Image (tube, rainbow, N blue to C red):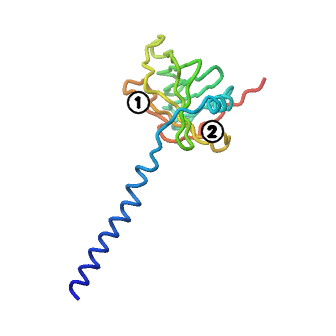
C-alpha cells in the first residue's frame, strides 16, 4: 500500500508539472508571433484607412496641471507630435515626421515605422533633426473598427525627450473631427 501512495504522489507531481507547462510556458512561445511585413495591397489598405485622420490623447487628462499630450496625424504621411506642459506653459514640444511609412503585422496588431523620418523640436530650444528618430514605431489594434481602435507607442530610444515614456500600453486615442 505504501508503494501505491508513492506512485499517486509522483503521478500528481507529473500532472501538476504538465498543467503548469500548458498554462504558463506554452503561451509564451505560441503567442509571440513575430511582426512580418505586409504585402503592398494590405499596406495600401492600411494607409487608405488612416489617410486624413488624426488622433490625440493626454495623460492624465487634457485639463491636468501637469500633462503629457500626443497627436498622431496621418494627413501627409505620418506625424507624431508630443508636448509636456504645466499649467498654461508648454515646457517641451517636438514632432517626428515622415512623408511615408512601412507597415508590419502580427495577429491583430499593425505596426507603423517612419520611412526617412525627420524631427523638429519646438521647445525648449528650436532645432531641426536634433532628436534621434531610431527605435520609434506606432502600434495599432482594431484599425478598421472606429469604436475599438487602440494605439501604443513603441520607443526603444532611452534618450527620447519628454513626455516619453507615455502610452506604452494599448490606449484609446480620441479622433479629431475636421469639417470643411
Where residue 123 appears, as percent x and y from the top left, is 48, 16
Quadrant occupied by the C terminus = top right
Numbered disc 2: secondary structure: loop
| Label disc, if present, on residue 146 of the rendered structure | none
The residue tagged 2 is 143
Whether residue 8 is situated above or below residue 54 in the rendered picture: below
Specify which label sits upstream in the sequence, 1 or 2. 2
Q: Residue at x 56, y 24 (%)?
A: 101
Report the residue that reaches farthest toward the top: 127
Where residue 67 appears, as percent x and y from the top left, is 50, 32
| Label disc, if present, on residue 156 of the rendered structure | 1
**Numbered marks: total:** 2
Numbered disc 1: secondary structure: loop
Return the residue nearer the eye: 96 or 28: 28
Report the residue that reaches farthest toward the left: 2
Whether residue 133 is situated above or below residue 66 in the rendered picture: above
Report the residue that reaches farthest toward the bottom: 1
Q: Quadrant of residue 6?
A: bottom left
Q: Residue at x 66, y 40 (%)?
A: 144
Return the residue nearer the eye: 60 or 2: 2
Where residue 94 appears, as percent x and y from the top left, is 50, 19
14 left or right of 34 in image? left
Report the residue that reaches farthest toward the right: 180
Quadrant occupied by the N terminus = bottom left
151 left or right of 49 in image? left
Callout 2: 10 Å neighbours few (<14), some, many (20+)? Answer: some
Q: Residue at x 44, y 18 (%)?
A: 131
Return the residue nearer the eye: 4 or 149: 4
Amino acid at each position: 500500500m505504501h508503494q501505491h501512495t508513492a506512485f499517486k504522489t509522483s503521478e500528481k507531481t507529473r500532472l501538476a508539472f504538465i498543467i503548469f507547462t500548458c498554462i504558463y510556458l506554452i503561451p509564451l512561445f505560441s503567442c509571440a508571433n513575430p511582426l512580418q511585413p505586409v504585402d503592398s495591397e494590405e499596406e495600401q489598405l492600411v494607409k487608405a484607412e488612416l489617410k486624413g485622420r488624426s488622433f490625440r490623447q493626454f495623460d492624465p487628462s487634457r485639463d491636468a496641471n501637469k500633462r503629457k499630450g500626443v497627436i498622431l496625424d496621418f494627413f501627409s504621411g505620418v506625424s507624431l507630435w508630443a508636448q509636456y506642459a504645466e499649467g498654461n506653459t508648454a515646457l517641451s514640444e517636438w514632432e517626428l515626421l515622415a512623408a511615408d511609412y512601412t507597415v508590419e503585422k502580427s495577429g491583430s496588431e499593425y505596426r507603423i515605422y517612419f520611412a526617412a523620418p525627420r524631427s523638429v523640436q519646438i521647445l525648449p530650444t528650436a532645432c531641426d533633426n536634433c532628436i534621434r528618430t531610431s527605435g520609434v514605431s506606432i502600434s495599432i489594434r482594431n484599425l478598421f473598427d472606429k469604436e475599438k481602435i487602440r494605439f501604443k507607442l513603441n520607443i526603444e530610444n532611452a534618450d527620447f525627450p519628454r513626455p516619453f515614456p507615455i502610452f506604452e500600453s494599448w490606449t484609446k486615442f480620441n479622433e479629431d473631427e475636421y469639417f470643411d
